[in-house]
Amino acid sequence: MAVAIVVLVADQVTKALVVANMPGRPDIDVLGEWLQVTYTRNPGAAFSLGGGLTVLLTCIALAVVVFIFTMASRLGSFAWAVALGALLGGALGNLGDRLFREPSPFRGYVVDWIQVPNYPVFNIADSAVVCGAIAMVYLSVRGRPMGGRTIVNQ
């Protein structure tokens, strides 16, 4: 749960700073062309796909949050707890945008602001979701169950 809280707070604080300071301003070079702060509002999913599916995306995010909370009681693995915490924090961060930002509840646009070369603009929540998902795949491939016991290969 601590990982989810850290991700959620970092995501919401950075989004609030970007929304308060970036509208109407040019992009900010942090590391030249390698990292920039670029304010955008995304009505869709990853890579701005599915812009007309905002309500569906909100419902999917709600389902993911409920699923993770149900799985939390079965966790006995620290690694799985970190992976699911990252996924939960990221899902909650973007869900908050969908529920509470303009244009309306369940149709809110997600605030994206991190720009790297040759990649769509994203945010901390997006990063946490991707990292959490990669960790979950890794743990699954390695045979690490959520309960904490390692499966022994025969």
Image (cartoon, rainbow, N blue to C red):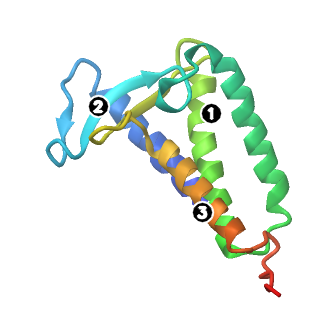
- Disc 3 designates what residue? 135
- Disc 2 designates what residue? 38
Q: Position of residue 80 (x, y in %)?
A: 69, 67
Residue 84, by quadrant, is: bottom right
Q: Position of residue 102 (x, y in %)?
A: 52, 15
- The residue sitting at 79% across, 74% down in the picture is 76
Indicate the amino acid at tag 2: Thr
Residue 83, by quadrant, is: bottom right
Is label 2 in a helix, a strand or a loop? strand
Q: Is residue 105 above or below residue 134?
A: above
**Quick one: 86 or 33, which is closer to the camera?**
33
Q: Position of residue 74 (x, y in %)?
A: 85, 66
Is label 1 in a helix, a strand or a loop? helix
N-term-proximal mark, 1 vs 2: 2
The reply to whether residue 53 is in sight is: yes
Tell me the quadrant of the picture where the N terminus can be found.
bottom right
